[in-house]
Amino acid sequence: MNALPIGIALLCAFQQEPSFEQQLIDDKVSIGYGIAIGDVDGDGKPDILLADKKAFVWYRNGDWKKFVMVENLTEHDNVCIAARDIDGDGKVEVAVGAQWNPGETADTTQSGSVHYLIRPDDPTQPWSPVKLHHEPTVHRMRWAKAGENTYHLIVLPLHGRGNKNGEGKGVKVIAYEKPQNPRQPWKHWVVDESMHLTHNLDVHNEGESECIYIGGKEGIKAFSYTKGKWRSKNSLKQLGKDSGFGELRLGKVEEQIPLLAGIEPLHGNILTAYVPRNGARKLNQAERIVLDEDLHEGHGLAVADFMDQGRDQVVAGWRKPNKAGLIGIKLYIPFNSLWEAWSVRAIDIGDMACEDLAVADLNGDGKPDIIASGRSTQNLKIYWNRTGD
């Protein structure tokens, strides 16, 4: 942490302290590859969806009972899940990725899968998978808004076809458009194929549509949907270009001024914040700030205003013991919008080998809560935000 001048330290001492209450939801998670949040049953409350090793499941808000959507979809592990209400009926549409076999970068029968899950009348019963086109090493996916009432499923493999050690052809980032009948062929097209080791992406609201930010070996690329096509925006590749990004999330330091949080490099130990300073207002003018260098296989990241400061804080989790032998999740709180100083608070140390984490207001109190899945700890937890209670 940056050393705090005495005056700043005294001011920080009077800042509201964050407070989180843990609740264990599941102690029998196999790996907990990926978390999504959305209303599955249409009761107006956000539920938790999880891509686990051999099952895609959801947990009902309130009693947090687990329901299996589909099991044993492919020979190899499941790896990712995307959930969002894209048709306005108050219930999420769900897509999943499986056949996780990152060592096989060429054979599509042995690596990668993309399925859309058709919901039954009763969502607590098994869902019906529809197989879609896929590339090898499918790793992450998100629904992104392309325009009014139009959403695309963005699927991100880890490697390009035939890659060895992150070298070779670029990763094919693919967009899919859901037809009215999801059993019919889906339109799909390549958004980009210029990057390597693309470990994660984020979708950020920017007016009529949304922007996709992709992090990989070369840094960051951003895409917006204009004139019927996902197009590359101004280059952000200088951000993280020396180490690459394993995780990235977009937030704000204040209204209309963005914040980018990252974990560097792939499965890295460094937590960074990219913050526009000296009157700058755009990410391509941002400065890199190292918040922490003591993660080990950082794998969970989110930004949100947990403390009602009017600017976002950063929460990060790692899955293997660090130099002190610890695993867990920590919260990073800026002193001001320039991140000239910050404080760090433990959310969970010792009982969360963080594979993924997400942020959502699960109980409607207006405060974002944290949801995390643990790999070696084999657990799923909610960290209820009690700040200010």
Image (cartoon, helix red, strand yellow):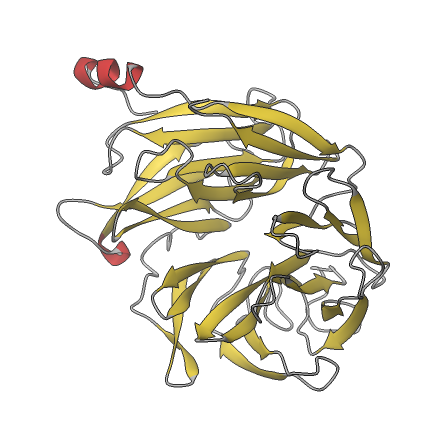
- Report x, y in % for residue 23: 66, 28
- Report x, y in % for residue 125: 85, 58
Residue for point 27% across, 20% down: 3
326 horizontally vs 367: left or right? right
- Report x, y in % for residue 109: 79, 73
Residue 218 appears in the picture as rendered: no
Total marks shown come to 0
Residue lying at the far front of the rendered structure: 43
- Report x, y in % for residue 46: 61, 49
| Residue 334 figure quarter | top left
The relative height of residue 16 versus residue 211 in the rendered view (above or below) is: above
108 horizontally vs 290: left or right? right
Q: Which is nearer the eye, 218 or 19?
A: 19
The relative height of residue 101 versus residue 312 in the rendered view (above or below) is: below
Residue lying at the far left of the rendered structure: 279
Residue for point 65% across, 83% down: 180
Residue for point 59% across, 77% down: 176
Residue for point 43% across, 43% down: 303
